[in-house]
Image (tube, grey):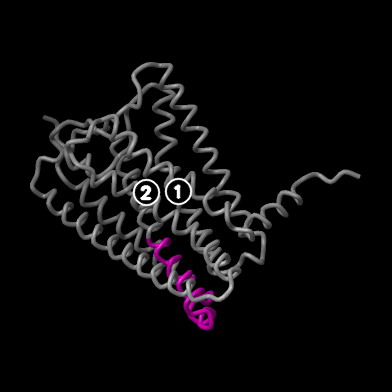
């Protein structure tokens, strides 16, 4: 049995064995990746260029787009390269970097989604205090806290996981490096330390989710008290996209990690992991742009400015 000092690379789970299917997966991954880059890139450009969107809500949306770009760039380029070159290998250092980056972006994204729920709560339930509670300094501090907590979470998990001795081979049952699958290769009881960290992170995530739910309960109560239908529409148009993104993020993650072992299979695990790691970053820009008139109007003006003028 090899130990961790002799492992120089890991072997990832392949999506397909035949060359034609591998090229098909490469084309599919490339299309999704380009769509994610285009969607999130447009959101970043529109928010940065349009001064009317320099508000707390769009500031946090800009952070979300950055994190989406980071998380999908951690996963898909390596998966595309493996499909294109018909390989399963990822280096030991590359695997550690992928684990760190993915946890960093995913954890920070969930913290940003939590802050966005607070933003919507203050905007709808305490509109008179919105300027004082969510000034530019407060927004910068909350965003920095989200990114900083994501970095600390990723650092702790990565150091704990890759300090364990590995003696059960180097084959990971996943198409990217993920902590539970690396832990399966450990031959030391020290993995319980990482299991404790995972439990702690799960409790923190549950606390954030409860906060989001309670925020939306208060938002719903406030909306139902609004006398005009226009107020209802404005509130729901800004809240529903965020709620949809949170639901997609949480539901796919929960199904991936909490599904019954009896229904687990390599093919199902691949599909589920793809759903929670790749689909949300690609779909989030579409969700936010569908019902947001301000964002669509700013995007339309940006495209008009970019279009060549004819005499």
**Residue 160's x, y, as percent?**
21, 52
Mark 2–mark 1 contact, CB under 8 Å? yes
Who's the residue at 29% across and 49% down the image? 254
Report the disc number at residue 70.
Answer: 1
Label 1: few (<14), some (14–19) or many (≥20) C-alpha neighbours in 10 Å: some
**Residue 296's x, y, as percent?**
64, 54
Question: Is 177 left or right of 31, judged from the image as shown?
Answer: left
Find out whether residue 117 is within the magenta segment.
yes
Q: Main secondary structure of the magenta part?
A: helix
Q: Which residue is mark 2?
A: 101
**Residue 306's x, y, as percent?**
74, 48
Which region of the structure is painted magenta?
A: 111-139
Who's the residue at 41% across and 67% down the image? 216
Q: Nearer the viewer, residue 284 or 197?
A: 284
Who's the residue at 49% across and 44% down the image? 282
**Corner quadrant of residue 54:** bottom right
**Residue 100's x, y, as percent?**
33, 49
Who's the residue at 38% across and 62% down the image? 111
Label 2: few (<14), some (14–19) or many (≥20) C-alpha neighbours in 10 Å: many
The earlier-in-sequence mark between 2 and 1 is: 1
Is the residue 237 above or below the residue 167 in the image?
below
């Amino acid at each position: 049995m090899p130990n961790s000092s002799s492992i120089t690379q890991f072997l990832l789970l392949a999506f397909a064995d035949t060359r034609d299917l591998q090229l098909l997966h490469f084309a599919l991954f490339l299309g999704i990746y380009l769509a994610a880059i285009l969607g999130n890139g447009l959101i970043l450009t529109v928010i940065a260029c349009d001064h009317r969107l320099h508000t707390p809500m769009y500031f946090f949306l800009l952070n979300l787009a950055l994190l989406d770009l980071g998380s999908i760039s951690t996963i898909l380029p390596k998966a595309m390269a493996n499909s294109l070159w018909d390989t399963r290998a990822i280096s030991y250092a590359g695997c550690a970097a992928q684990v760190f980056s993915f946890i960093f972006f995913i954890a920070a994204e969930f913290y940003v989604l939590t802050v966005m729920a607070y933003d919507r709560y203050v905007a709808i339930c305490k509109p008179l205090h919105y300027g004082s509670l969510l000034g530019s300094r407060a927004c910068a501090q909350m965003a920095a806290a989200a990114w900083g907590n994501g970095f600390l979470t990723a650092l702790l998990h990565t150091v704990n996981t890759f300090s364990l001795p590995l003696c059960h081979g180097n084959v990971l049952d996943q198409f990217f490096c993920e902590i539970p699958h690396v832990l399966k290769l450990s031959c030391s009881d020290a993995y319980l330390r990482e299991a404790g960290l995972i439990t702690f992170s799960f409790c923190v995530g549950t606390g954030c989710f409860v906060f989001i739910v309670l925020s939306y309960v208060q938002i719903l109560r406030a909306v139902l008290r609004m006398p005009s239908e226009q107020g209802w529409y404005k509130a729901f148009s800004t809240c529903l996209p965020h709620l949809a993104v949170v639901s997609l993020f949480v539901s796919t993650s929960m199904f991936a990690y909490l599904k019954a072992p009896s229904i687990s299979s390599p093919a199902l695990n691949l599909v589920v992991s793809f759903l929670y790691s790749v689909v949300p970053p690609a779909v989030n820009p579409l969700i936010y742009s569908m019902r947001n008139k301000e964002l669509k109007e700013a995007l339309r003006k940006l495209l008009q400015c970019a279009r060549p003028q004819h005499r």
